[in-house]
Amino acid sequence: MTTFLEQYTPSPWQIDHVNLHVNLFQDHALIRSKLSLRQNEQSPVPGGKLRLNGENQQLIELLVDGIKLTPERFHLEDEVLTIAGLPAECELEIVTRSEPQNNRELSGLYRSGSMYCTQCEAEGFRRITFFLDRPDVMARYTTTIEADEQACPVLLSNGNLVRQEKLPGGRHVAVWEDPFRKPCYLFALVAGKLSHIEDHHTTSSGRCVTLRIYTEAHNAHRCDFAMTSLKQAMRWDEETFGREYDLDLFNIVAVDDFNMGAMENKGLNIFNSTAVLARPDCTTDENFARINSVVAHEYFHNWSGNRVTCRDWFQLTLKEGLTVLREQLFSADMYNEGVIRMREVDYMRSVQFPEDAGPTSHPIQPRSYLKIDNFYTPTVYEKGAEVIRMIRTLLGTEAFRKGMDLYFSRHDGTAATTEDFVRAMEDASGRDLKQFRRWYQQAGTPTVTISEDWNCKSGEYSVHVKQEQPERDDYPSPGPLHIPLAIGLLDADGNELPCRLTGDEEMPVGTRVLELRDEEQTFTFAGLPQRPVLSPLRAFSAPVILQHDCPMEELAFRFANDNDQCARWDAGNQLMLRAVLAAIREHQQGHELRADTLLVETYGRTLAQAFDDPFFYAEALRMPTYAVIGQHLNTIDVQAINAVLRFYGSVFADAHRDTLLELVDRCRKLELQDNLAEQHNAHAMGLRSLRNGCLTMLMETPSAEYQRMCYKLFADSANMTDAQAALSVLNHVSCEEREQAFQEFDERWRKDNLVMNSWFRLQAFSRLENTLDRVDKLREHPAYDEHNPNKVRALVAGFSTNHVRFHAADGSGYRFLTERVLEADQFNAQLGSQLVRPLARWRRYGETQGSLMRQQLERIKASVRLSDNVREIVTRALR
């Protein structure tokens, strides 16, 4: 059944307290819940029948105020339990039975290995017990867990541990009490044989908080980095946003079987093991950074999501977009602000922009959904963060902080809305954000077009700006948006010029934020001694497609001189993109490919100074991604894109061979000299990133010399970053070194689940012709488990991002993915809906490929046992 935002009404019933008793056995669980119910006077339809959600459980008994209900008092149908004739206040007791060991949906209460755990967001609590499963029903919880002490010596839930007791027959019990009201999606329970590490954090007010990270015993030595990240996040949130933790205990548990990255349950965060476990010999720099940000993200939710939660699921970006922004600001402070921002922008353009341009496009606040699970998307998360970042840009950091303080104080302990957030920003700053609110209803990526005029006599320089929004039948344009456009003006030497608009008295130098409100506006700058070079959209001040038809020479100049790192990177990226697009047109017309001389020379000059700032240049020298290139083509031609990228790779490798080899050698020597192999700070990460990027470029002209060089890097690697970089470079070359390296990696790491995920993913991404056969065969590998989302995402979803082999001309890649979607959907609908999305963009490909993709979507749609999760994606794709 479709749910609509406009139909929201407060719940007719509220629950003040939940007393939950979970009795765990080897083959089942008995759950007894006691709900303190009362009619909600604020509801337009108070009282009446009580309707509770419930899935995959057996109802055993119902009691009201201690009296057992007879069958005529209740009705159970279509996963809804309806109870009539309840008094205005009462205690409802519900006894149910479930089988966690058979719950492969990984939602509700399930078993991962020998461990019991829960995942309740978005609608998993209804799989534990019958409940008012909606975020605006907030209650205090007392949770009693009973289990066999030998099988489950550790019993965890939200809040504070208030009692432990041994029971007859080798069983024991633990009672947890959460003093804070919360919606049921934040409930958590873990039971199993676990080890933990412990540390402490003293808050700014002097309170001591105990910190524990639980995992299986063999992984306990991999938790130190996550603990350090947690302490960094706690301190940062106090210093940056004034937010202290509010309990005396904070627990994290690492779980191998998990649909998401992590979950912010109050006081008991449950994490996918990939987002906790780390050690230099088995974790890459990329994963270290991810763990640092995910740990921070879930901790920050304690305020932006838990203390202030969502009124309904249409407000999902209220907590996720805000928390992603907080996580991004934290990561910028922990590593390198410019590089972190570049990576965020690259993700937006490679992942979120294509979603915006496809059939599953939606605003950050959708209007309807069939399954809310399908809206945990880059749009809600990353674009949601960009929208809030724009508010911060418009108000300034000081006023934004005041708005955050007001928002938290005004809505603490409540279920809020995006409107509440924006209003707090207005009230704290005195700014009118009425027009800005349109971003919450806007679908697709806006386009901002810039043109320029220069009057040498008056020294006036005019910037003409036009905004356009994609036309959509399902989400009509809400009207012109309020867009912050950060710009700078450079002189011929790359120095900042004054950005004084006509009529201004001050002469501000550096970045200036222009506020675009109309469909077309002109901004005129006065008092300039020379025609400036425009540096537009600095720091990616708005999630828009920028069209600025400046000369290639100007892009090259900005790539060498712009003072804003993000804008400088973007200029280089646009320079490469234009050259690639021109070459694709030549290739499609059957012409011989010729390299753009300006690009090759600019690349060489930039490469020559890369050692000065390895972290920045490692990012800046990467070629545009397939996804970014495809957005600029009317029809995505994967083979043409691949041919041109391989062509330019070989051109760069041949033209700058000596510089590339020198950088590989210098980075390696400095890493050894300064003992950086096991360090994961910005300096060490930058050296490895630059060296491995150079090695990747060299291998665009594969030779026996380079193959031996890569294998030696693999054999001598002192960390997982170097080992995987060598594998990644060898991955696309059919040679003895490739087979030997992959075999040795398998033999060493076969019993390590997390490391083997990378091994699967790398092979799935190979450009070699036999990749699909290899991927299909890898499904039989002992380390592969088709019921584990991490494995499936690594191998199957990994293959679907292999643009060359997934889009094989015979459609074999599409058939393979369809079979995996149908298989996964039978036991885990969330996983199935995640896998099917690459097929949804079939209209962006040529007639032949698009038709083959559409056929597979029709095949999926015709399946008799299709989940609502997958059906919603497929229906929208075919609509």
Image: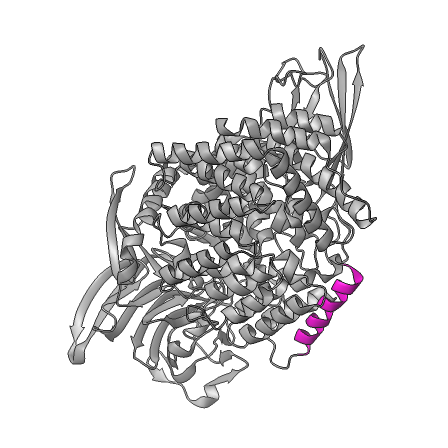
Identify which residue, 123 or 220, lies in the foreground.
220
**What is the quadrant of residue 277 in the picture?**
bottom left
Considering every residue shown, the one lying at the far bottom of the view is 71
Q: Residue, x 46% and y 44% (percent of image)?
A: 327
As drawn, is 854 to the left or to the right of 425?
Answer: right
Q: Is residue 855 magenta?
A: yes
Vertically, is 132 above or below 286? Answer: below
Q: Which residues are magenta?
A: 846-862
Image quarter (top left, top right, bottom left or bottom right) of the N terminus: bottom right
> Looking at this rendering, what residue extends furthest in the right direction?
589
Answer left or right for 727 relative to 191. Answer: right
Number of marks present in the image shown = 0
**Residue at 25% of width from left, 38% of height from top?**
206
Residue 10, relative to residue 481: is it above or below? below
Q: Position of residue 793 (x, y in %)?
A: 51, 62
Q: Quadrant of the C terminus?
A: bottom right
731 or 329, which lies in front? 731
Asked whether residue 62 is in view, the answer is yes
The rendered magenta stretch, by its main secondary structure, is classed as: helix
**651 and 833: which one is in front?**
651
Residue 790 placed where, x, y %?
46, 63
Q: Is residue 31 left or right of residue 862?
A: left
Residue 139 showing in the rendered view: no
- The furthest residue to the front: 704
Whole-percent x and y of residue 282? 37, 52
Against 181, is 90 above or below?
A: below
Q: Position of residue 31 (x, y in %)?
A: 35, 77
Residue 790 within the magenta-colored segment of the rendering: no
Q: How is the structure coloured here? A: one colour
